[in-house]
Image (cartoon, rainbow, N blue to C red):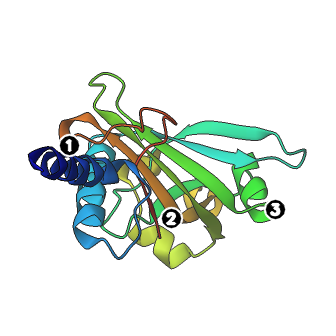
Amino acid sequence: MKKIYLLLALSAFVSASCSIYTELNAQVSLKKDSLLLAAHEIISETTYCGLATVDSSGQPRIRTMNPFPVKDDFVIWFATSRTSRKVSEIKANPKVCVYFANHQTAKGYVNITGSASVIDNRELLMQMKRDYWNGIPGWQEKFVLIKIIPGTIEVINYQHGLNNDPDTFRAPAIIF
């Protein structure tokens, strides 16, 4: 009888401890909050990130970007040239992926998939202006903003014990 209780207790413990490795629903607020905190830590420690788009031939394209500070809603903002390839790619296919990682500390990574839109709003651009833009002649006419609404956030953060699934290597994720 003791063996059955021990097996049931062990099974419950393994089940509870492994649940962090599975995809989380928004209803699990504690786990969702923990994942978001772990994601925000990595993002806030990262100056640059990778932005992936898809070109007209279906070829993925990735480039290094300097995002504006990401707030608690995980909406990601960039500024870029209105004539850049990424702008035309986003207008044709708004599905994007943004990858944050600090490879010097090897703390983990955050991968956000979502929907991007090009925002051509000079007033908002002026509010978000960065000091170094003053060195770019005509930046007010050249720049537009890119806004990314997250759909899914995957997080690996070793300090928080967020590792990939040992069988599938899938990262813990939140679907918005």
Front in this rendered view, residue 140 or 33: 33
Task: Give the residue type that dot 2 points to.
Answer: Pro
Mark 3 or mark 2, which has the lower sequence index?
3
Which residue is situated farthest in the right direction here? 57
Q: How much space separates mark 3 and mark 2, taking CA atoms?
A: 18 Å
Q: How much space separates mark 1 and mark 2, taking CA atoms?
A: 22 Å
Is 4 left, or right, of 29 in this rendering? left
Percent position of residue 13, x then y = 19, 50
Q: Residue at x 28, y 31 (%)?
A: 107
Q: Which residue is mark 3?
A: 92
In the rendered structure, are the residues bearing label 1 and label 2 in contact, judged by CB atoms less than 8 Å apart?
Answer: no
Q: Which residue is mark 1?
A: 160
Q: Residue at x 31, y 47 (%)?
A: 18
Front in this rendered view, residue 93 or 83: 93
Q: Secondary structure at mark 2?
A: strand
Q: Residue at x 50, y 64 (%)?
A: 150
The relative height of residue 33 versus residue 165 in the rendered view (above or below) is below
Which residue is situated farthest in the top direction here? 104
Q: Residue at x 88, y 49 (%)?
A: 56
Is 42 left, or right, of 88 in this rendering? left
The mark closer to the camera, 1 or 3, is 1
Question: Badge 1: few (under 14), some or many (20 or more) residues near its Cα, within 10 Å?
Answer: some
Q: Which residue is mark 2?
A: 150
Percent position of residue 126, x then y = 45, 69
Q: Secondary structure at mark 3?
A: helix
The answer to whether residue 127 of the structure is visible from this angle is: yes
Task: Give the residue type that dot 1 points to.
Answer: His
Percent position of residue 71, x then y = 32, 65
Mark 1 or mark 2, which has the lower sequence index?
2
The answer to whether residue 137 of the structure is visible from this angle is: no
Q: Secondary structure at mark 1?
A: helix
